Image: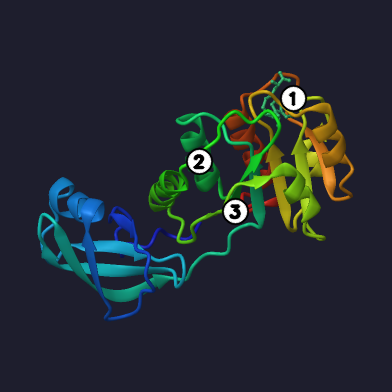
Amino acid sequence: MPATPAWPPSSLPRLFVDEPLAQGAVVTLDGGAANYLANVLRLQPGAQVKLFDDRTGEWLGKLTEAGRKKVTMIVGAHLRPREPVPDLWLLFAPIKRGRIDWLVEKATELGAARLVPVTTQRTVVERLNLERLRAHAVEAAEQCDRTALPELAEPVKLERALKDWPQGRALLFADEAGGAPLVEAAAPGPAAILIGPEGGFTANEREAIRALPQARPVSLGPRILRADTAAAASISLWMAAAGDWRG
Ligand code: SAH
């Protein structure tokens, strides 16, 4: 194992900033980010934080001003580039608030590249608050050391997703009615996992999905998992079998 670099201390706070970072750039934060740094962490000018922008990677920032409502920082050393993310999409039928927040947070920690809410016939949740879901993804990325955010797509109807399915992408269809063990169906290369709603897929949805040449029905064992559990379990299995958990 390479020795853990002593500098910068890994304990530094990490913050996503939605602007391209560069050496010498001045970053001004207000709202929640300023409150977190100045009031929660009570950082003073001179304190260091890690900043990442989902574009150029991670940088060392140094506070030059730490007001209650506004914090300014100057960007210093480039610590690392934006990491490559395994090319795995998660397509999920929106589920109840709380559980969907948990699903987005876990999918981010587990390494998904793209999250696609898919409306199916038994989807009960109508309106999705993408801003709230994006905030959960950002917070999870800050915590789990990602410098690349997962992309959060606009909701799409299942039929449309199937109609526009990309040629070279495998679709691991988590089918509670049964399928191959996921670890056997998983292979390196562009992939997607599809998880249904609490009510499951209808018969004609199942037929339409299985009709897709790229679809691989997969089983997640003999028990019926909640959709959020199924999402976390299937991403984990894929990461171990075909993603970046293979050391
Ligand atoms: N109400 C349905 C289950 C839906 S579970 C029923 O009782 O049959 C929500 C989603 O999680 C499913 O659509 C499927 O995508 C996934 N899932 C849950 N358990 C699974 C399993 N054992 N194998 C494969 N997928 C599963």
Query: Label 3, label 2: how many angstroms apart (C-alpha)?
Result: 16 Å
Instruction: Give the number of the disc on residue 114.
Output: 3
Q: Is residue 245 left or right of residue 211?
A: left
User: If you read the primary sequence from the N terminus, does the residue marked by circle 1 or circle 2 appear first?
Assistant: 2
Q: Which residue is mark 2?
A: 128
Instruction: Determine the quadrant in which ligand 1 lies.
Output: top right
The residue tagged with tag 3: helix, strand or loop?
Answer: strand
Residue 29 figure quarter: bottom left
**Residue drawn at the location 45% of the way across and 49% of the way down:** 134
Inspect the image, locate mark 3, and give the three-letter code of the amino acid beneath it.
Arg
Q: Which residue is mark 1?
A: 221
Q: Is residue 85 above or below residue 179?
A: below
User: If you read the primary sequence from the N terminus, does the residue marked by circle 1 or circle 3 appear first?
Assistant: 3
Q: Is residue 178 left or right of residue 234?
A: right
Residue 57 location (% of width, % of height): 44, 69
Q: Is residue 133 above or below residue 153?
A: above
Label 3 with label 2: CB-CB less than 8 Å: no
Q: Nearer the viewer, mark 1 or mark 3?
A: 3
Q: Is residue 119 left or right of residue 26?
A: right
Q: Is residue 69 above or below residue 90?
A: below
Q: Is residue 184 left or right of residue 57?
A: right
